[in-house]
Image: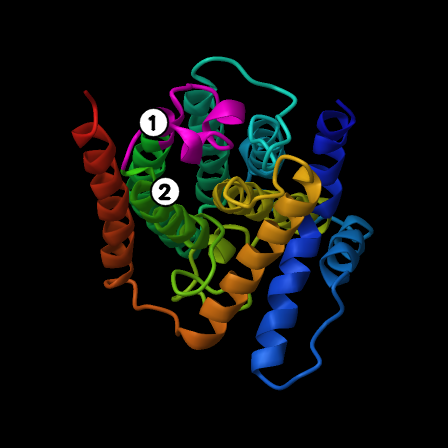
């Protein structure tokens, strides 16, 4: 019970720390000391203290983008379990609401970018929705596979019990789903090879170009929402790892934290070893993630009696 009460606090407070782990791993591979682990917290606090500048051409939609994006990610995170720790919210079929909450945040973020009338931000918005067509399909396929493996339709039961179901091909299907969700993680959180959150070249940006006109607290909300989204998708991948650990039931928080750090390290390794893909090649990797989830779906359907 205590673990479930701690769930929202850990989600809200520890999310930026994972981005610090990614930065540390990238600095290690580059032979540098790198920024401190708490640097994402310092950046958010710095933005909160800055003045917000608003264009006279924008409307209420411009400010609704960061606010709705942040709230939608927070609500979606309350449905995601942390390993064996149940989520605060949950009901049968909640994985559909989870996916559409993320889509709602994306819709308002794209609308805020279009509200500026900027050609660059419109270009980023077009790229964002194009990639979303692939990632949402992969996400739904993955969640359907987890539902079949666990025999449940709630995220709090689907993820922890996915590897303990009666399906013979559960191990292979889980491996494919974990790989597919990791690709979705990289795309949805704008990481290399799909995007570079540290770039300043408008012609190569996707997510960052949509928030070029945001500043101060609005940009802080965008940055914090990005950290929460990274933690959310990392929890999905880590949940599959943590459920397979022998101590996951007796030591739920420890197993989940270990799996979360492992996912963050994997992201750092990928960003250090792989370059950013050209935009024309990025959809191919997204399609590969969708095929992995589709193959996992075929495996679990084949084993239906």
Total marks shown come to 2
Along the line of sight, which residue is nearer the eye, 118 or 90? 90
Does 35 sit above or below residue 49? Answer: below
Q: Earlier in the sequence, mark 1 or mark 2?
A: 1
Along the line of sight, which residue is nearer the eye, 133 or 165? 165
Eye-nearest disc, 1 or 2: 1
SS type, badge 1: loop
Residue at position x 68%, y 62% in the image: 20
Residue at position x 50%, y 63% in the image: 266
Along the line of sight, which residue is nearer the eye, 31 or 149? 149
Residue at position x 69%, y 46% in the image: 254
Along the line of sight, which residue is nearer the eye, 1 or 193? 1
- The percent coordinates of residue 43 (x first, y second) are 74, 59
Residue 282: image quadrant is: bottom left
Is residue 163 shown in magenta? yes
- The percent coordinates of residue 106 (x first, y second) are 46, 37
Side of 250 where 200 appears, left or right: left
- The percent coordinates of residue 236 (x first, y second) are 50, 40
Give how far apart the Cα atoms at labels 1 and 2 are.
13 Å
Residue at position x 28%, y 44% in the image: 134
SS type, badge 2: helix
**Magenta highlight range:** 146-168
Quarter the N terminus occupies: top right
Residue at the extreme top: 92
Which residue does the numbered mark 2 point to in the structure image?
174
Which residue does the numbered mark 1 point to in the structure image?
166
Does 268 sit above or below residue 40? Answer: below
Does 250 sit above or below residue 40? Answer: above
Residue 23: image quadrant is: bottom right
Tell me the crowding category of disc 1: few under 14, some 14 to 19, or many 20 or more residues within 10 angstroms, Cα based.
Answer: some
């Amino acid at each position: 019970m205590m673990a479930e009460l701690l769930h929202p606090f850990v989600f809200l407070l520890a999310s930026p720390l994972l981005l610090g782990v990614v930065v540390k791993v990238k600095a290690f591979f580059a032979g540098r000391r790198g920024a401190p682990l708490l640097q994402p917290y310092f950046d958010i606090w710095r933005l909160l203290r800055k003045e917000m500048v608003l264009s006279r051409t924008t409307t209420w939609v411009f400010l609704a983008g960061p606010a709705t994006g942040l709230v939608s990610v927070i609500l979606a995170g309350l449905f995601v379990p942390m390993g064996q720790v149940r989520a605060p919210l949950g009901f049968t079929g909640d994985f559909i609401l989870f996916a559409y909450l993320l889509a709602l945040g994306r819709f308002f973020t794209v609308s805020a970018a279009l509200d500026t009338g900027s050609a660059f931000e419109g270009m980023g918005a077009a790229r964002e929705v194009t990639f979303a067509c692939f990632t949402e399909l992969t996400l739904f396929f993955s969640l359907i596979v987890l539902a079949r493996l666990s025999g449940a339709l709630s995220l709090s039961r689907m993820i922890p019990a996915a590897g303990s179901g009666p399906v013979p091909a559960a191990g292979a299907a889980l491996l494919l789903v974990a790989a597919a969700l990791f690709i979705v993680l990289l795309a949805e959180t704008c990481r290399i090879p799909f995007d570079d959150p540290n770039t300043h070249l408008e012609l190569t940006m996707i997510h960052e170009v949509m928030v070029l006109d945001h500043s101060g607290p609005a940009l802080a909300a965008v940055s914090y929402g990005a950290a929460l989204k990274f933690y959310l998708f990392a929890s999905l991948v880590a949940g599959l790892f943590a459920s397979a650990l022998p101590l996951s039931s007796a030591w739920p928080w420890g197993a989940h934290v270990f799996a979360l750090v492992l996912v963050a390290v994997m992201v750092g390794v990928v960003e250090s070893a792989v370059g950013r893909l050209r935009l024309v090649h990025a959809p191919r990797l997204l399609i590969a993630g969708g095929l992995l989830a589709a193959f996992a779906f075929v495996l679990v359907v084949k084993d239906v009696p």
